[in-house]
Amino acid sequence: RRVLFRSLGLREKASGGRPVSLAGAFRFEAEKLLLERLLEGEGSSEFRASIRALVEPRLKPILIELDMAKVAAVDDKGRRLEPVASEEVPIAPDPTTIAVPLVLRFVAPPRDATKIARLEGELAVWMPAHTQTFRFAGLAPGKGAAQASSGIRVEIRAMTVEEGVWSYPVIVETPPTEAPVESHLQAAIENEIYLEKADGTRFSQNGGMSTIVQEPGRAGVEYLFVDAPGKPEDYTLVVRAPAGVGKVPVRV
């Protein structure tokens, strides 16, 4: 039996997924909306919105500030919900993932409300203004070096070799910053160090790391490379560090 199709077209499928909002390099997805009403006892009923923020990986955000005074939830009667707390909430993104969970808490709307008509707000995102690249060629066991550029100083303390493990203690010093976090130094240089041969071949850092210095404006990490082919002198150690940080508003 043969069936003849006289026409072929495309039809838009009704969206049944979660609400999504795009803001530049950020994608916000509503994961859960929860209304909790207390029948008795102290405290107030709450409405909570769980939002997942997805960040473009190359941005490497250091800190996200959530100010509930800049977040608005409006019910279907046009009434604005009051936030449970109005203070700023600092959120440190996990550098191993692009997703950042956000939980927005409000006093529950009156019982005649049937839905949340609008949820919007503004975040402040701290991120490196730009990165500075430092290259240390031909470091041999027992040797170190230091370079400075754009207010950043990177020191490689004496590297060591032991049973196939190459250890590079790296100290990064940065100028004073407004950012309310100093741990950004380590977060910014994680996964930003590798070995490179003259032909451009890279050997990624693969043996773990440990903090050796943690002070305001100064952070040190010991990086391990395991079973790299050849000798340390065959490589250039490449370190990328942030040259300052900037605060960017993100409107959702």
Image (cartoon, rainbow, N blue to C red):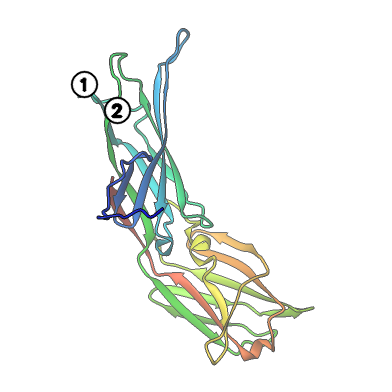
CB within 8 Å, label 1 to label 2: no
| In-image side of 136 versus 31 (left or right) | right
Side of 171 where 40 appears, left or right: left
Q: Name the residue furthest left.
A: 78
Amino acid type of the residue tagged 1 in the rendering: Lys
Cα distance between the residues tagged 1 and 2:
9 Å
Provide the residue designation for mark 1. 77
165 vs 143, nearest the viewer: 165
The residue nearer to you, when weighing 162 against 81, is: 81
Q: Is residue 110 above or below residue 166?
A: above
Residue 124 horizontal/vertical position (percent): 33, 49
Residue carrying label 2: 116
Farthest-out residue, front:
1
Q: Residue at x 39, y 59 (%)?
A: 56
Q: Earlier in the sequence, mark 1 or mark 2?
A: 1
Numbered tag placed on residue 127 in the rendering? none
Query: In screen coordinates, is 10 left or right of 159?
Result: left
* Image quadrant in which you'd find residue 82: top left
Residue sitting at x 29%, y 25%: 81
Q: Secondary structure at mark 2?
A: strand
Q: Nearer the viewer, residue 2 or 57?
A: 2
| Res 178 visible | no
Residue 207 visible (yes or no): yes
Residue 142 position within the rendered picture, expressed as x and y whole percent measured from the top left: 69, 84
